[in-house]
Amino acid sequence: MYRLRITTTFKVFATLGVVVLAIAAAELVYGPVSLSLWGVAGALLGWGDPESTAIVTQIRAPRALLGLVVGTALALSGCALQGVLRNPLADPGLIGVTGGASVGAAATIVLGDTFAMGLPKDIRPYLLPISAFLGSSLVTGLIFRLSRRSNTTSVATLILAGVAINSIAGAAIGVMVYISDDQQLRDLTFWTMGSLASANWTMVMVTLAVVVIATTVLTRMGRALDLFQIGERAAFHSGLN
């Protein structure tokens, strides 16, 4: 039975891996300028024509890789929260993390020109992801602070606090949408839809480094997250600090 379960799991992951690779290949081939698989291979290996090489290496490949890295990050965050909240349906949007990130990003898109005037030009492209990260971090710290009682975390209170913060975040985003101009509204809409239009190799490398660090940390915390599934008190008696 155990061997059968392992085999089935392997088949599922192998199938999903093939699907991901097929979608990534399709992203490299199709677009306003359609390319053949041979042309994509030539561009990646350095013997393609200049136009195909520029399209693949400077536009499509960074977007495809950034999408894969971001998808990995979303999967990791979902798994971690499912362990902490002891709920297989949990995700960052449930407790307001996504809402906090959206508020930070919306504030930067709409008001960023005002606050970025004194910043160095090298930092300005990273202002949007930094703001989104700070917004999600503040929300995460706040909801865990609100849910702590007698050195334990109430999952019910944490979820309720997250729902309330999601509502507040939605109202704040509505204000940003109201005061934004047409270009800012377009940028905000595309950002919330998960746009990868501004992807470049620098962004891919920075994001990949962050995800690798997060993966390493969460892998080391795997046993703790598994113990959380049986509750905080039981996890404590099982040796978890």
Image: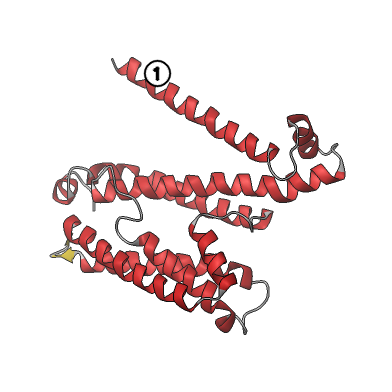
Q: Report whether 186 appears left or right of 99.
A: right
Is 115 placed above or below 98 here? below
Disc 1 secondary structure class: helix
- Would you identify the image quadrant in which residue 122 lies? bottom right
Q: Report whether 102 appears left or right of 109.
A: left
- Would you identify the image quadrant in which residue 37 lies? top right
- At a point 71% along the width and 50% down the height, the residue shown is 59
Decide which of 201, 169 is in the foreground and name it: 169
- Would you identify the image quadrant in which residue 18 lies? top right
Is 18 placed above or below 181 here? above
Label 1 Cα neighbours within 10 Å, binned few <14 / some 14-19 / many ≥20 = few
Decide which of 208, 221 is in the foreground and name it: 208
- At a point 30% along the width and 55% down the height, the residue shown is 94
- At a point 35% along the width and 56% down the height, the residue shown is 93
Decide which of 240, 79 is in the foreground and name it: 79
Is residue 153 visible in the rendered image? The answer is no
Q: Please say which color scheme the image uses.
A: secondary structure
- At a point 70% along the width and 37% down the height, the residue shown is 29
Is 48 placed above or below 231 here? above
Q: Measuring from the top left, give residue 104's x and y in whole percent.
A: 45, 70
Considering the image in quadrants, where does the N terminus appear? top left
Which residue position holds label 1? 7
Name the kind of residue labelled 1 in the image. Answer: Thr
Q: Measuring from the top left, give residue 226's x and y in whole percent.
A: 27, 41
Is residue 89 visible in the rendered image? The answer is yes
Q: Measuring from the top left, give residue 54's x and y in whole percent.
A: 79, 48
Please give the count of numbered marks on the rendered protein.
1
Q: Measuring from the top left, give residue 175's x and y in whole percent.
A: 41, 76
